């Protein structure tokens, strides 16, 4: 099977399933758990989005059944921390912030007609 060097891809599960090249930086997760306020300062195209996706898959309770598949041969799969798969993550693709809504809500709850609506009136 031919392996590819992904460029600009931030889909961790997809990278692992398709057997693409992946630089294992999961050893940093142990260190990250000791830091109170982490900040990711890196130049463009240095894998910030991909690493946050790695963190999401690592900590997400809903991904516990895929832990061995995604992390089994990586450092953190062989040396998991006590916090792995212990947090819930909300699917942000279904939510947005509307200026007249007090909290994040779905489109239909805010009374918008479609996801393509870009302009909001004060009456909504």
Image (cartoon, rainbow, N blue to C red):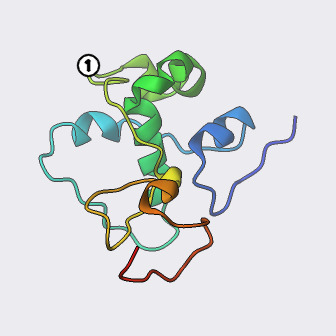
Q: Which residue does the image show at 38% across and 69% down from the upper left?
A: 98
x, y percent for residue 32: 24, 42
Q: Is residue 42 above or below residue 53?
A: below
Q: Is residue 41 above or below residue 55?
A: below
What is the count of numbered marks? 1
Task: Give the quadrant of the N terminus.
Answer: top right
Q: Of helix, strand and loop, which one carries label 1?
A: loop
x, y percent for residue 99: 33, 74
Furthest residue to the right? 1
Quadrant of the image occupied by residue 105 = bottom left
Work out whether residue 72 can be spotted: no
Left/right of residue 34 with respect to residue 54 in the rendered view? left
Quadrant of the image occupied by residue 27 = top left
Left/right of residue 84 with respect to residue 57 in the rendered view? left
**Disc 1 crowd, CA 10 A, few/some/many (<14, 14-19, 20+):** few
Say which of 57 and 97 sits in front.
97
Q: Which residue does the image show at 56% across and 21% down from the upper left?
A: 66
- The residue that mark 1 highlights is 82
Q: Is residue 108 above or below residue 100?
A: above
Say which of 94 and 81 sits in front.
94
Task: Give the quadrant of the C terminus.
Answer: bottom left
Quadrant of the image occupied by residue 59 = top left
């Amino acid at each position: 099977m031919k392996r590819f060097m992904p460029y600009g891809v931030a889909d961790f599960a997809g990278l692992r399933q398709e057997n693409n090249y992946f630089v294992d930086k999961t050893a940093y997760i142990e260190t990250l758990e000791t830091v109170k306020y982490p900040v990711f300062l890196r130049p463009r195209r240095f894998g910030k989005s991909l690493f946050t996706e790695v963190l999401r898959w690592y900590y997400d309770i809903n991904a516990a059944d895929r832990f061995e598949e995604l992390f089994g041969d990586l450092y953190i799969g062989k040396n998991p921390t006590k916090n792995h798969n212990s947090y819930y993550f909300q699917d942000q693709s279904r939510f947005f912030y509307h200026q007249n809504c007090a909290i994040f809500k779905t489109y239909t709850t805010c009374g918008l007609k479609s996801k393509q609506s870009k302009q909001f009136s004060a009456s909504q």
